Amino acid sequence: MQRIVTFKIDSRLLWLLDRYARRKRMTRSEVIREAIVRLLKSEGIDVEEAVKRAEEEPRGGRAPVIEVPV
């Protein structure tokens, strides 16, 4: 299940994101999802296994909000 995530981004970084997405013929969301997966994998996280485990866990209510300083 996909969820909507909202976050703040510097306008210059957004401009670079849009430029990259256009060159790759991708949406912003596709670029961001791919970047997150690459980051997690670079940190040694087995993304496929983590997603599988998360799908098996019962979830009540909303996921916690995690604030990341920029």
Image: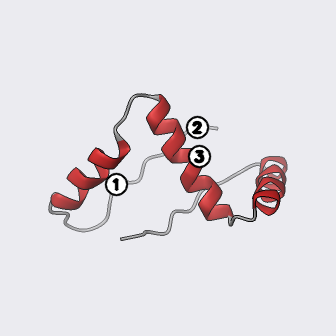
Residue 65 at x, y percent in the picture: 41, 53
Q: Which mark is residue 69?
A: 2
Q: Is residue 59 left or right of residue 7?
A: left
Give the secondary structure at mark 2.
loop
Q: Which mark is residue 24?
A: none
Instruction: Out of 28 and 63, give the one closest to the viewer.
Output: 28
Query: Disc 3 marks which amino acid?
Result: Ala
Quote the CA–CA distance across marks 3 and 2. 18 Å
Sequence-wise first label, 2 or 1: 1
Q: Is residue 41 left or right of residue 22?
A: left
Circle 2 packing at 10 Å, graded few (<14), some (14-19), many (20+), is: few
Residue 20 at x, y percent in the picture: 79, 53
Query: Disc 2 marks which amino acid?
Result: Pro
Q: Which mark is residue 64?
A: 1
Residue at which label 3 appears: 35
Sequence-wise first label, 3 or 2: 3
Quote the CA–CA distance across marks 1 and 3. 21 Å
Sequence-wise first label, 1 or 3: 3
